[in-house]
Image (spheres, grey):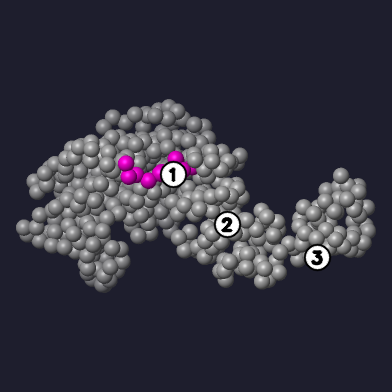
Amino acid sequence: MTIIDTRTPDPKRLIPGATGDWEVIIGMEIHAQVTSRAKLFSGASTEFGAEPNANVSLVDAAMPGMLPVINEECVKQAIRTGLGLKAQINHRSVFDRKNYFYPDLPQGYQISQYKQPIIGEGMVIVSVGPAKDGSFEEIQVGIERLHLEQDAGKSLHDQHPTMSYVDLNRSGVALMEIVSKPDLRSAEEAKAFLTKLRMLLRYLGTCDGNMEEGSLRADVNVSVRRPGEPFGTRCEIKNVNSIRFVGQAIESEARRQIALIEDGGKVEQETRLFDPGRGETRSMRSKEEAHDYRYFPDPDLVPLVFDQAYVDALAADLPELPDEIRARFIKDFGLSEYDASVLVSEKAIAEYFEKLAAGRDGKAAANWVINDLLGALNRNGQTIENTPVSPDQLGAIIDLIKDGTISGKIAKDLFEIVWNEGGDPLRIVEERGLKQVTDTGAIEKAVDEVIAANPDKVEQAKAKPTLAGWFVGQVMKQTGGKANPQAVNALVKQKLGIE
């Protein structure tokens, strides 16, 4: 494979070293577990959290005479992912045997795709940011290929003092290995790419993206060079299982390589592991110790062949993807790029917002979702799927503000009540006397009392009109936040003689 350099060195992406600036080059191989009830070549369940060796068929255990049979749903999921990546869909692909021995690989080989994968070159547009001004920088990250393969089982080394146990529940589970081109130039770009890819897979419904369950793992290839020079020797960091750790691993490995070269050493191609506790990478095996996998076509599986009509039928049922939804939110609701990006970060959040914003002011709806709802969910360790405040309830709160029934301050209190106790917002307002005071006589009385009690502040406000806000705050406090803020503001200015 010829590696093409697609990026011009960007000064703000360079890493300063003792002898000058360095550029980091990053490519990624992402292993995404296919969302499917059964494994790639057997009918065994893929359910997470089952008892050890509960989800194992005779095929998964490599019993003599057992033959693999392709799971068509896994093929469909790979094609859907390829379409989402705007990639070439190969109508003919071949499964190969990747030969190596490991205790949790019963067959002694892994069924994968080597020279003829199901998906070819594609592309992902990644938004990096936001910058201080709220803007994003868009970069294009090339996809080299996507192929289907089996996962291995899991060796358990902490169950017995002298023996290791093997759990084959994952053995044979379908994986999509998505290989990027070396188009990433910083840890932030790599994190943004992995975040975008996980978002895309979740919208497509082809992988749940749960990194804590092992559904998404990344191998990260890192090398460094002087700006404008040829690519350096890369090291591969295996099995990084969180987006935050991907960023830390890249920064640590880049600085290790820079220090090594500046000290007169040479980077050796090797496989490394990231230690999150120590924040550094360590050697796993060198190039000389790398396996010769001796790939050859699997004699038990015929080539996988389908026509364009098969692809078109899957394309017709694809959901609206995050980039399209973000553009629509900006156009239809007048949202900022940042707000729209937050709202499409998860499919469930985008769906919640759409229900809430229907027939309402989009910017107000976005502010309530981003600042209040997501803030409360984060504080309580909850997700949008189990939010205690429904779109109808939050919509009712927004409507009560719009029609002047409650003030913005009362709305915040009402949100907390609905969050903790539930109920109909309008009924809560009526039963608890939360309606804002719009009677100008009552408001004027409160304004007069505050002014009379603070003659020194009156003189200061006349000299410095911005101090009128202090009087507004005092009146709101005296009325328990129920006074109409606009009416209070107008009366305060009138009484103080401030324009």
Q: Is residue 247 left or right of residue 458?
A: left
Q: Could you tell me if the residues under marks 3 and 1 are in contact, i.e. CB atoms within 8 Å? A: no
Q: Earlier in the sequence, mark 2 or mark 1?
A: 1
Residue that badge 1 annotates: 322
Q: Amino acid at mark 1?
A: Pro
Amino acid marked by disc 2: Gly
Quadrant of the frame with the C terminus = top right
Q: Quadrant of the N terminus?
A: top left
The residue that appears at 92% across and 61% down in the rendered structure is 452
Label 2 to label 1: alpha-carbon separation: 23 Å
Is residue 333 in sight in this rendering?
yes
Which residue sits at x=28%, y=29%? 2
Mark nearer the viewer, 2 or 3:
2
Q: Which residues are magenta?
A: 316-326
Q: In the rendered image, which quarter is residue 117 located in?
A: top left
Residue under the image location 31 percent in, 41 percent down: 315
Task: State which tag comes first along the sequence, 3 or 1.
Answer: 1
Residue at numbered disc 2 = 395
The residue closer to the viewer here, 344 or 399, is 399
Question: To which residue does mark 3 refer?
Answer: 478
Q: Is residue 277 left or right of residue 370?
A: left
Identify which residue, 48 or 18, lies in the foreground.
48
Contact, mark 2 vs mark 1 (Cβ under 8 Å): no
Q: Is residue 381 left or right of residue 6?
A: right
Determine which of the numbered discs, if any, sits on residue 215 in the image: none
Place of residue 217 in the rendered image (x, y in percent of width and height, measured from the top left): 34, 52
Question: Where does the image place residue 279, in percent across and percent down from the top left?
Answer: 44, 53
Vertical relation: 54 (above or below) 473: below
Answer few, some or many: residues within 10 Å of disc 2's Cα (few below 14, many 20 plus, some between 14 and 19): many
Residue 236 drawn at (x, y percent):
33, 45
Is residue 17 visible from the viewing direction of this image?
Answer: no
Tell me the element at label 2. Answer: helix
